[in-house]
Image (cartoon, rainbow, N blue to C red):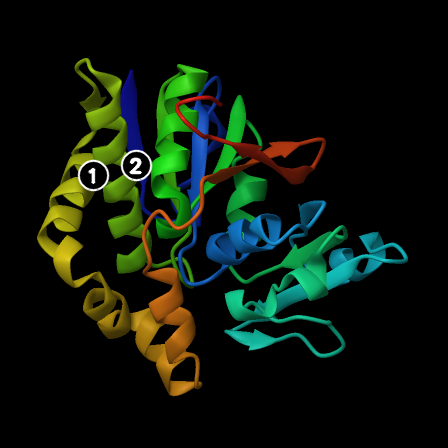
Amino acid sequence: MRIDCISTVSETFGRDLAGKTAIVIDVLRATSAMVTALERGAKSVAPADTVASARQSAEPGDVLAGERLCKKIPGFALGLSPHEFTEEAVGGRRVVMTTTNGTRAIQKAAKAATILVGSFLNADACAKAALRLNRDVVLLCSGTKDAFALEDGLCAGMIAKRIKEEAGRRVATDDLAAAMEGAYRHFEHRLDDALLSSDTGGRLVALGYREDVVFCARRDVYRLTPVMAGGELRPFECRQGVF
C-alpha cells in the first residue's frame, strides 16, 4: 500500500486518483459537519458544488445546509457549524450541502475507486476503512481559496500515521504525506492551539465560531466513515475492526 497526499483542490487531477481510495479532508468545517450529520442520524449527505445546484436538487423534506466564505447561505436551513447538525435538525432526512471547498473537493475526487470523508473526528475509523478497502490511498486536502490549509494537512498526517500503525506492514508514503505526518506528531499535543492559530481558524474565530474550531479539533469522537455511494455520502461504520 502507498499513501500520497494532495495539498489543495486545485492540485487534484483524475489521473492521480484512478483506482485508489480518496480521503477528502476539509476540517474547518465541511468534512467535520458531514461526519457529524451522519452521526446524528441524517439519512445521507448529498454534496453539491454550487448554491444553485443545491437548491435545484433539494426535494421536499431535505435539509439545505452550507456556507460561502464561512457564512451561512441565505435561505438555507443550516450553515456549516457542526453544532447545528442535531438529531432534531437532520435525523432521518437527507442533507443537501454545498461549501466553498469541501464539496468541490469531493467532485474533483470522482475518478477515485472509492471516496471516503475524513476529519479529526473520525480519523481512526477512516484509517481502518481505507485499510479494509486495501488500495493505495490519496489524502486530498481541500485547502482554502486554492491555498494549503494547515488543519487539513495535520489531519492528513494523523490519518497517514493511523494507517501505518494499523497496517502491520510497511506502508510507503510520498514526501508530502511524510511531511504532514511529521507535522501532526509535532502538534498532536496542542492541536486546539494549532487550529485556532491557523489562517482558517483565525477567520472563523473572528466571525464568532471559536467553538466550531475547538469542536473540529477533537479526535476519534465518531466511529463512522462516510462513503460516497450513488452520489451521496452514507455511513459505513468501523466497530471492533469490522468495516
Q: What residue would you read off at disc 1?
A: 176
- The reply to whether discs 1 and 2 touch (Cβ–Cβ < 8 Å) is yes
- Closest to the observer: 88 or 46? 88
Name the N-terminal-most of marks 1 and 2. 2
Q: What residue would you read off at disc 2?
A: 5
Say which amino acid is labelled 1.
Answer: Leu
89 with respect to 37 (left or right): right
- Closest to the observer: 64 or 36? 36
Q: 238 above or below 202?
A: above
x, y percentage for residue 82? 52, 65
Residue 91 is tagged as none
- Closest to the observer: 173 or 35? 35
62 with respect to 111 (left or right): right
Q: Quick one: label 1, few (<14), some, or many (20+) residues within 10 Å?
A: some
Say which amino acid is labelled 2.
Answer: Cys
Query: In percent of the image, x 32 and y 61: which residue is there?
Result: 217
Q: Name the residue furthest right.
A: 60
Query: In percent of the image, x 53 and y 25: which residue is there?
Result: 114
**Distance CA(mark 1)–CA(mark 2):** 6 Å
Q: 17 above or below 56?
A: above
For mark 2, give the secondary structure: strand
x, y percentage for residue 162? 25, 33
